[in-house]
Image (cartoon, grey):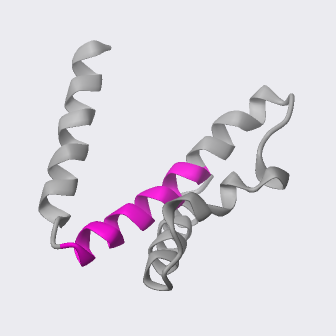
């Protein structure tokens, strides 16, 4: 996935939240988009799912006035993951 595709997916997630869609309405949760039996496609699917979800969550946090808290949590999770590696 290119950086442009990643940004497009994040923007799509953000737009979905603006339009009132719920997080569980992520289009990458649709059965026809989920990888079946092809483990090489799993990483790509997960990255696309997560990019859309990130955009949705960032927009949701900004609407709830929790944007700073949201990003602090993401940084904390990333730091913990780096320490565990």
**Residue farthest along the bottom direction in this orientation:** 19
Q: Taken as a whole, is the magenta stretch helix, strand or loop?
A: helix
> 5 and 9: which one is in front?
9
The C terminus is located in which quarter? Answer: top left
68 with respect to 51 (left or right): left
Magenta segment: 48-64
- Residue 30 percent coordinates (x, y): 75, 56
Q: Is 62 drawn above or below residue 52 in the view shown?
A: below
Residue appearing at x 62%, y 52% in the figure = 1
Residue 32 falls within the magenta-colored stretch: no
Residue appearing at x 59%, y 56% in the figure = 2
- Residue 40 percent coordinates (x, y): 76, 30
- Residue 24 percent coordinates (x, y): 56, 58
> 24 and 28: which one is in front?
24
Based on the displayed image, in which of its 4 quarters is residue 37 positioned?
Answer: top right
- Residue 20 percent coordinates (x, y): 48, 81
> 24 and 68: which one is in front?
24
Q: Is 40 drawn above or below residue 2 in the view shown?
A: above
Q: Is 64 drawn above or below residue 83 in the view shown?
A: below
Residue appearing at x 81%, y 51% in the figure = 31
């Amino acid at each position: 996935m290119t950086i442009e595709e990643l940004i497009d997916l994040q923007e799509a997630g953000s737009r979905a939240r603006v339009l009132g869609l719920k997080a569980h309405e992520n289009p990458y949760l649709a059965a026809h988009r989920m990888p079946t039996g092809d483990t090489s496609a799993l990483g790509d699917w997960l990255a696309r799912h997560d990019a859309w979800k990130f955009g949705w969550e960032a927009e949701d946090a900004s609407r709830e006035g929790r944007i700073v808290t949201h990003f602090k949590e993401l940084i904390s999770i990333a730091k913990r993951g780096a320490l565990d590696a």
